[in-house]
Amino acid sequence: MLTDPQDHLAHQFPLEGELRPTFSGLSDFLHRVEDMIVKELAKNAKSHAFDGFDVNWEDQNETVSCKHRLQHLVAQEKGLHVTSISWSCTGSVIACAFGRVDDGDWSAEKSCVCTWNLDRRGLNPKRPNTVIDVARPVMSLSFHPTSPSLIAGGLYSGEVVVWDTNRTQDPVLAQTGMSTDAHREPVYQVAWVPGQRRGEMLVLSAGSGGRVLLWTVDGGSLVLSAGYALVRQQVPHNSSLSKGRGSSNVGVTSLALSPWDSDTFLVGSEGGLVLKCSFSAQELAAAPPDGESVALRAPAQFSFSPRGGPVHSLHYSPFHRNLFVSVGTDGLARLHSLLQPDPLLSLRVSDSYLFGVRWSPTRPLVFAAATGQGLVQIFDLGRKSLRPAATMDQLTSGQPAYCMEFNPCQTDLLAVGNADGSVNIWHLSTELTEQGHRETAQLEQLANEVAE
C-alpha cells in the first residue's frame, strides 16, 4: 500500500528519463525548417499590415451592441420624431422620415427625409448624406425593392410622393398633389407592390381615412390605378361595428403585405381591428363617392379578434405562410394564425404602448417589439421562459421607439427610429441570428395549435 503522495505520483507518471517516447525523424525535420521559420518571423516583425488593429479579448458572445447613433440636428432642434425608416435594397443606405406622432395640429410644419450610407468612408452620424426638405411632416417611407435611389413617402397632409435621391436639384420624381384621388388624412403606410406589367412596381398607400390606394408612376405624377375602402358595415363577422357612431370608415393605422401570396394583405385599424384583405376583391365599397376617378372596392375577407386600442404594427412570418404578429396600445404582442380569429399566443411585452414589431429574417421563432418606454425587446419563442432574450435601451430618456427594420442584406443589423429624433443601428449576435436545431419544426407545431 502506498502512503506517500509523492510515491503515488511517481507510479502514475514516469520520472524524467524513464520511458521517454521518441518520434523518429522529428529532430531532423525541425533542423531542416529552422532557418525558414526564423526568416518568416523576422519578415512578419517588420510588417505594418496590422497596424492599428485592436485585438478584442473580451467576451464575443455579447447579445447586442449599438454600432451607430444617427442624428439630424436640425430636425432634433425642432423636436421632430423619427416616424418611419427603410433600408435600401443593397442594405447600404438607411432612410428616415421626420414627423409627429403625438396629438396636435402639425399640418403646416415643415419636415425632411434623411439618408445615411453606412458603407461610405468617413460616415458622420450627425450629418446625413442626403437631406430632402418636405413641406409637411412625413409619416411613412419605403425604398424601392430594386432601384436603390427611389423612395416612396406618405405625408401628414395625405399626399404620396416618390423621391429620387440621384436628382440632387429636385428629388421629387412623382407626387399625387392635392387631387381628388389623394388621401384627405395622414398616410400611415406606403409600400411597393408588383403591377400587372412585367417589372412594373406600383405605390401602395393607406391612411386613417380608411382608404388603401394603388398608384402608377406616370411622368411627374402618381395616377390612381385601383382603390379600396374599409367600411364598418362590410367588415366580416363584426356586424356590431355597423351600429357604432361617428364615421363609417375603418381608419387604417398599419398594413402588412404577404410574402407568400401577392393577393393578400393585412390591415390594422384605429379601433383595434385586424382584417385580412384581398386585392382581387370585386365587391364595391359601401362608401359615398368622394370624387375618386376609380370605383372603390371592399377588400376585407376575414376579421380577427379585436384589440383594446389602435393596432400600430403588423408583420408576416417569413417562415410560415399562415403566421403573423401584431402589436398596439394594449402592450401585448399577439401571434396569429390566418386560419382562426383568436390569437395563438398573447405575450405581455410592456405596460406602455407598442409601436413596432418585426419578425427576424433568419430565426423562425424570434421577433422584436418596440415600446413606448424606449426599449426594443427581442423574444425567442423556443425558450422555456417567455422573458425577453435581449433588451435594447435606445437611451432616449424613456421616450418611445416608434419604428424598426432589419437590414435585408446584413440581417444581423436592426435599425430603430426614436421619438428624440435619433436612429440607432444595432448589431445582433449569432445567438439571435443563427437558426437553431428543429426551429422550423417548432414553428410548424406552434402554427398547428388551436387557440383556446
Image (cartoon, rainbow, N blue to C red):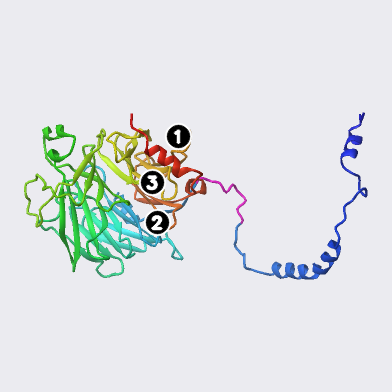
Q: Indicate the position of residue 38 as horizontal and vertical percent values.
A: 77, 68
What residue appears at the point 48 percent right and 33 percent down from the top-left corner? Answer: 384
Q: Which residue is mark 1?
A: 387
Name above or below for residue 172 compared with residue 325: below
Give the camera-side residue of 339 and 185: 339
- The residue at 15%/32% (across/down) is 240
- Name the residue carrying label 2: 408
Check the picture and name the quadrant holding the C terminus: top left
| Amino acid tagged 2 | Pro
Locate residue 216: give its quadrant.
bottom left
Q: Tell me if mark 2 has few (under 14), some (14-19) or many (20+) residues whose alpha carbon lies within 10 angstroms of its own.
A: some
What residue type is disc 3 on? Trp
Q: Nearer the viewer, residue 203 or 398?
A: 203
Of labels 1 and 2, earlier in sequence is 1
Residue 202 on the magenta span: no
Task: Give the numbered dot on residue 359.
Answer: 3
Q: How dense is the environment of label 3, judged by Cα within 10 Å: few (below 14), some, or many (20 and up)?
A: many
Cα–Cα gap, marks 3 and 2 = 12 Å
Tell me the SS state at disc 2. Answer: loop
Q: Earlier in the sequence, mark 3 or mark 1?
A: 3
Residue drawn 18% across and 38% down? 236
Find residue 166 and report its horizontal and vertical position in percent: 31, 69
Residue 16 x %, y %? 91, 48
Residue stretch rendered in magenta on the structure: 55-63
Q: Which mark is residue 355?
A: none
**Residue at disc 1, secondary structure:** loop
Q: Are marks 3 and 2 in contact (CB under 8 Å)?
A: no
Reading the chain from its start, which is encountered first: label 3 or label 2? 3
Where does the N terminus fall, quadrant-wise? top right
Q: CA distance from mark 1 to mark 2?
A: 27 Å
